[in-house]
Image (spheres, helix red, strand yellow):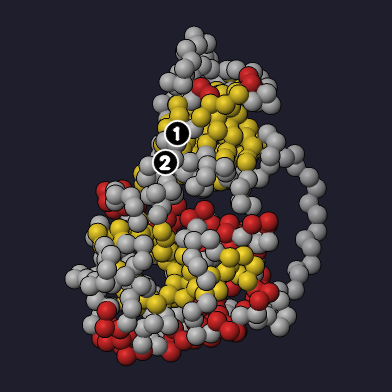
Amino acid sequence: MKAAPLSAALTVAVLLAACGRSPAAPTQSTPGRAPAAIEAEQGQLDTEQLQGQTAIDPRTGSGTVISDASASGGQAVKLSATGSAVRFPMPSGTSGSYAVTIRARGVTAGGVAPTVALRVNGTEKARVSLTGSSYASVSLGTQTLQAGDTVRVVMLNGNSTGTRAAIIDYLDIQSAAAAPAPAPTEPTPAPAPAPAPTPTPTPTPTTGIKLPPTGLMSWDWQIGASSDSAISVPAGAKLIDLDGFNTSAAKVAELKSKGYYTVCYINAGSWESYRPDASKYPDYLKIQQDPDWAGEYFLDVTDVFKSGSALAPILQARFKMCKDKGFDALEPDNLQNDENVSGGRVTTQQQIDFNGWVADQAHAAGLAVFQKNGPDKILLKDRTGKMMVEKFDGILNEECQQYSECGPLAEYTKRGKLALNVEYSTALNCATYTSLGVSAMKRDLGLVSPGMSGYLRQSCN
């Protein structure tokens, strides 16, 4: 156990979790004194709720106690799965306002540092990214705590491989005593008023954008439809996502006349050999072949910010095509080339900047736009200082349940935006999707339409 460094703190015992250790005998506590540092490995390892909702099947189900010579006592807790948490029950004598810190370090993956949240009785109170690879004290703000409160530190952005991790050494809680009032000083003359700053002009909002419907709903995704005639919207569905090149303006008009919200699929981050504009892509943009799809190459998405960009006008023309055909919204695929391309050719920040550019360009074209995949990127900011959840009008994700990353999708639903998810091989956990506000279904990998070979659709809504 780490001894409290301040006289205002009193070391207290907490019950040891079921992690192979015996409970220590409790020390006496003094009323009105603050609890001191509580070792992470003495907390209970469990799965916390994300934004008040249960995370689906975390990869490990909890944190892991690890040996670490740099940690106090030689042990710490590693949180790697989204939703994994270490819980610190507040002992007797806790009552009032406390400065809360954690001693922790982060293991970055894909250029993204782990992000953890402090939750008190299930309510999020603070959120921080652990950017340092060495242990440091990280403030979680001043919190009101009572004996018996359940305090958790929760991992928010685990990745599918479990390589991104938050390493928690201990939680420290110190009485937040009121600061003494400053001694009176002689009054000084008031400074001359500064000239009023020139207000920054407010950008004119794009008009004509029809935002996606919100809440739980039935929908379908048929980008594998072979022709207009193959497209058939399931009964009760409100939204249909179709291939932008293979769907005619007449078909879009027909669907909209029946009240369907129409989404246009295009590939933003990859080159496809079979598209009618494929010859416009210079070879230098194609930086790595996609191992999963023949005839496709991941693109150097940083090109859109270069003078004389070749990629920017190609994508702008694709967005315009979607708008001209009458689609309501855009689904831009392959927004994760920072992960898809080896060798660090595209950094995470470059990818986030590109994604923000896509959202801005879609809006400029008069389209709503969905973030495609990347739950771990939802809260990251692009070069304009805005998070992805602020840039995009909704999210369309694949296999969040398969990779234990559904919880972050609630960042969209809690803002009143649409969140969609598709599973291909995992049985749907509809109860959890409902609690998250995510509209989910299971589909065939080819995303074909009814009547085509291999069609499969099971919907939670």
Quadrant location, the N terminus:
top right
Amino acid at the residue labelled 1:
Ser
State the residue in front, 5 or 63.
63
- Picture coordinates of residue 440, whole percent (x, y): 31, 58
Amino acid at the residue labelled 2:
Pro
Within 10 Å of disc 2 (Cα), the crowding (few <14, some 14-19, many 20+) is: many
Q: Measuring 48% from the left and 41% from the top, which residue is drawn there?
A: 81
* Farthest top residue in view: 25
Disc 2: which residue: 58
Mark sitting on residue 23: none
Quadrant location, the C terminus:
bottom left
Let me know if residue 205 appears in the view. Answer: no
* Farthest left residue in view: 235
In the rendered image, the vertical position of residue 48 relative to residue 300, given as above or below = above
Within 10 Å of disc 1 (Cα), the crowding (few <14, some 14-19, many 20+) is: many
Let me know if residue 25 appears in the view. Answer: yes
Q: CA distance from mark 1 to mark 2?
A: 7 Å
Q: Is 130 left or right of 390, judged from the image as shown?
A: right
Mark sitting on residue 62: 1
In the rendered image, the vertical position of residue 341 relative to residue 196, given as above or below = above
Q: Measuring 71% from the left and 83% from the top, which residue is drawn there?
A: 308
- The secondary element bearing badge 2 is classed as loop
- Picture coordinates of residue 320, whole percent (x, y): 49, 86
In the rendered image, the vertical position of residue 40 relative to residue 356, given as above or below = above
- Picture coordinates of residue 353, whole percent (x, y): 62, 67
- Picture coordinates of residue 209, whole percent (x, y): 42, 81
Q: Measuring 68% from the left and 56% from the top, which residue is drawn there?
A: 343
Q: Measuring 75% from the left and 74% from the top, which residue is drawn there?
A: 195
In the rendered image, the vertical position of residue 63 relative to residue 55, given as above or below = above
State the residue in front, 116 or 68.
68
- Cβ atoms under marks 1 and 2 closer than 8 Å: yes
